[in-house]
């Protein structure tokens, strides 16, 4: 099962577009990488691109890799992360194209990974109509998660009958006043096609592309700010055997997004109380999604990797 792996993306000074916001706003941590290996190297020992940054308020980061040389397999990949008021999102893509006339580099693996963590530290529960007082009240978060995977395979020739494989994975976690809850999701495919029952637990148990539900109930203070933190990681990986030919790709798309519920109350709490947060975009217990500038920026940025323009790039656009 997928584990959180933010350490894999070390600090990398990529010149990419950022959205600068005042320090008083929410903190968004964005990281990701693209890596590959042949059987002669350590697992994913060759870093092809990476990013690691922290922004205030709203931000988006990414990296892409494109390699095309005559007589050699071509490779394309991208990873993009985004976060802002009340949401996190991510996208990962890996593609490998080999012809029988290409050189035989041996078995090959490529992985793209995206990570984002957003923290909103000004969540306040208060009595409707105002008033003082303190104490604790029960509280849970209504969530909306959207995600999908894509596997494509064509022109496959496998002379050694070894087979190829594809992996799409995601992890999501949320902490409310320091109490955490999570879920993991993994879909794999080989010559027999995608697994019919993807592996999932927590928020991703029986996941069919959408989760619309609530977190566990925790106790939170009244009239005292506390924090909510969300984390999302997505992976896309391809594995190709030695020899033969194939056009193979994997995508993991959580660009549309992981957030507080966009209809009805954002949080569940006792009658007579409401919730507000400027950092998370919550007014009177109602959340309105305002995604990263360029609503489909994640997909347009990530899709560039599939064009095969014969270049290598470590910077997102």
Image (cartoon, grey):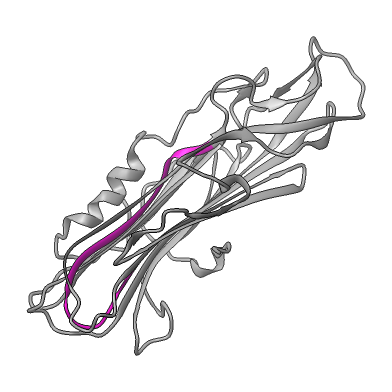
- Residue drawn at x 51%, y 69% as measured from the top left: 8
Q: Main secondary structure of the magenta part?
A: strand
| Residue placed most toward the observer, 176 or 190 | 190
- Residue drawn at x 87%, y 14% as measured from the top left: 131
- Residue drawn at x 60%, y 19% as measured from the top left: 264
- Provide residue 102's location: percent of width, then percent of height: 11, 79
Q: Within the magenta stretch, is there residue 252?
A: yes
69 relative position to 267: left or right: left
Q: How many marks?
A: 0
The answer to whether residue 263 is above or below residue 186 is: above
- Which range of residues does the magenta coloring cover? 236-258
Farthest residue to the top: give it. 129
- Provide residue 302's location: percent of width, then percent of height: 31, 51
Pick the quarter of the image with the N terminus: bottom right
Observer able to see residue 57: yes
- Provide residue 112's location: percent of width, then percent of height: 38, 62
The answer to whether residue 61 is above or below residue 67 is: above
């Amino acid at each position: 099962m997928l584990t959180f792996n933010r350490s894999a993306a070390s600090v990398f000074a990529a010149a990419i577009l950022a959205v600068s916001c005042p320090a008083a706003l929410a903190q968004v941590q964005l990281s990701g990488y693209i890596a590959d290996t042949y059987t002669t190297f350590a697992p994913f020992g060759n870093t092809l691109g990476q990013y690691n940054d922290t922004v205030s308020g709203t931000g988006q980061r990414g990296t892409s890799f494109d390699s095309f040389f005559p007589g050699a397999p071509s490779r394309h990949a991208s990873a993009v992360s985004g976060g802002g008021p009340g949401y996190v999102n991510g996208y990962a893509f890996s593609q490998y194209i080999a012809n029988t006339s290409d050189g035989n580099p041996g078995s090959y693996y490529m992985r793209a990974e995206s990570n984002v963590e957003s923290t909103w530290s000004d969540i306040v529960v208060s009595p409707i109509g105002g008033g003082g007082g303190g104490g604790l009240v029960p509280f849970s978060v209504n969530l909306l998660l959207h995600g999908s995977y894509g596997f494509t395979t064509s022109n496959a020739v496998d002379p050694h009958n070894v087979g190829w494989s594809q992996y799409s994975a995601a992890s999501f976690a949320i902490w409310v006043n320091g109490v955490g809850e999570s879920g993991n999701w993994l879909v794999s495919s080989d010559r027999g096609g995608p697994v019919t029952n993807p592996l999932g637990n927590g928020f991703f148990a029986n996941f069919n592309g959408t989760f619309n539900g609530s977190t566990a109930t925790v106790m939170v203070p009244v009239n005292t700010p506390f924090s909510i933190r969300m984390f999302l990681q997505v992976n896309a990986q391809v594995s190709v055997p030695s020899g033969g030919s194939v056009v193979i790709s994997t995508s993991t798309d959580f660009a549309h997004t992981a957030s507080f519920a966009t209809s009805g109350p954002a949080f569940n709490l006792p009658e007579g109380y409401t919730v507000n947060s400027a950092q998370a975009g919550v007014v009177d217990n109602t959340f309105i999604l305002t995604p990263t500038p360029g609503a489909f920026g994640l997909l347009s940025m990530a899709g560039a990797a599939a064009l095969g323009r014969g270049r290598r790039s470590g910077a997102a656009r």
